[in-house]
Amino acid sequence: MLREELGRANRAMADKMSQLGETLTQRVRDLRDQVTNAPQNLLALESRFMSGDMPEQEYKSTREEYRNQLTKNLRNIDEIRSLLLIMSQLDARPSGPGQGPQGPGMMGRPSSPD
């Protein structure tokens, strides 16, 4: 009976890790898109300001918003790195007796956000 409960707990943990992996992968894609678009957005902002289409106060506040968003993205990337490290350590843990490196029914994390 204890072995069955352990098996159920291992499967539940594997499911949660798989969900977390999927969530992290999607978050990495979102961050990648935001970071990729940042230079383009900054250039467009500079162009609008230099051409006189945007008042200085709006330019400064928008530029500050972009800076804050990039800072937040960097923090999120660090958090994701930490979570991925924890997940890889959990994946490397030996399973219960008679099980391979991954417990029964365990699915691996997505390998790449691309």
Image (cartoon, rainbow, N blue to C red):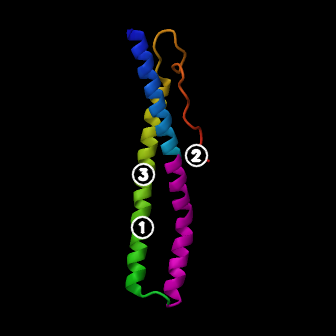
Q: Which residue shows up at 42% across the image and 75% down it?
A: 62
Q: Residue furthest bottom?
A: 52
Classify 10 Å Cα crowding around label 1: few (below 14), some (14-19), many (20 and above).
some
Q: Which residue shows up at 50% across the image and 34% down it?
A: 18
Q: Is residue 85 above or below residue 10?
A: below
Nearer to me, 13 or 46: 13
**Residue bearing mark 2:** 113
- The Cα atoms of the two marked residues, 3 and 1, are separated by 14 Å
Q: Indicate the position of residue 113 as horizontal and vertical percent values.
A: 58, 46
Nearer to me, 113 or 107: 107
Lower position in the chain sequence, tag 3 or tag 2: 3
**What SS does tag 2 mark?**
loop
- The Cα atoms of the two marked residues, 1 and 2, are separated by 24 Å
- The Cα atoms of the two marked residues, 3 and 2, are separated by 15 Å
> Magenta part of the protein: which range?
26-52
Q: Is residue 44 within the magenta segment?
A: yes
The label on residue 76 is 3
Q: Indicate the position of residue 22 as horizontal and vertical percent values.
A: 52, 41
Q: Is residue 11 above or below residue 99?
A: below
**Residue bearing mark 1:** 67
Q: Is residue 107 within the magenta segment?
A: no
Residue 108: image quadrant is top right
The label on residue 54 is none
